[in-house]
Image (cartoon, rainbow, N blue to C red):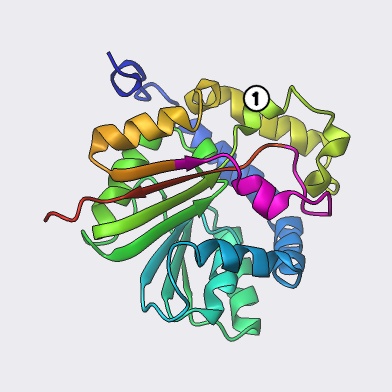
Amino acid sequence: MSELEKISFEEESEEIKDKVISYWTKRSESFSEQRHDEIHSYKRQLWQAEFLRYFSKEDKLSVLDVGCGTGYFEMVLSDFACQVTGIDLTPDMIERGRDLLKRHDSSAKLMVMDAEHPDFPDESFDVVVSRNLTWTLPHPIEAYKEWQRVLKPGGILLIYDAEYAKGFHHYNQEDNLAHKKVSESMDRECHEIYHMLTISSLDRPQWDKEVLAGLGFENIETDLGAGDRLYGEKDEFYMPDRMFLIKAQKSGEN
């Protein structure tokens, strides 16, 4: 029996999403400020170089950014020819993101929407990308099914995430420089959310790879070096959790 068959998320409480919204609403102001600083740092060039591994600046692609927060990827991709749509469950994040994009004359669109239930027609996007989202999802398999649904045949999925729940126990919180301005009470609240989520206990990204294969994705790759490329330097954006990348491609058959 595979991990896909053994693990069930049906009992996950719907209260988790309410807690996630509450947490990120309280963090939205400081989070927005940090993303603003990050977009005006060398990190923007690092992320652009990361995406250039998979498509060029001239490719006129439709991109869905799930869990877009305050529009960081939208700004990273603003120099590309692609059209980006970002969705996030937290209204405050979307509101602040729209303000950020407006100030920078970005044409990207941000919408309040559940990443597990994206309200788009089948085969709407060439690329689906996410950063630091999957660990927050009560029903990640359903999300992967939906992201597969909205991808065009041959489209690619790029997931950047980390085992944040496990890392919480393995390093000194003072080493988490990206959380310097996050209060102890907010850290505890985040930790409580970790413990409510089944995905926090899984062996990732191996589990994700197996799930995606079971759903019919092709050319699945996991890259444990993504965090070293993007966040190897101990600056104000540094987190000791090792970010990984999962790349997968939807079957080219209709």
The residue that appears at 30% across and 59% down in the rendered structure is 155
Q: Residue furthest left?
A: 254
For this view, does 249 lie left or right of residue 20? left
Is residue 139 visible in the rendered image? The answer is no
Give 19 or 80, whichever is nearer the viewer: 80
Establish if 72 lies above or below 190.
Answer: below
- Residue 156: where, in percent of width, then height? 35, 56
Q: Is residue 191 above or below residue 130?
A: above
Q: Which region of the structure is painted magenta?
A: 222-240
The residue closer to the viewer here, 1 or 124, is: 1
| Residue 219 percent coordinates (x, y) | 32, 46
User: What amino acid type is highlighted by mark number 1?
Assistant: Lys
Residue at mark 1: 166
* Residue 108 place in picture, x, y as percent: 48, 76
Using the image as rendered, state which of residue 199 and residue 48 is in the foreground: 48
For residue 226: magenta? yes
The image position of residue 126, as x and y in percent, is 32, 65
> Does dot 1 land on a helix, a strand or a loop?
helix
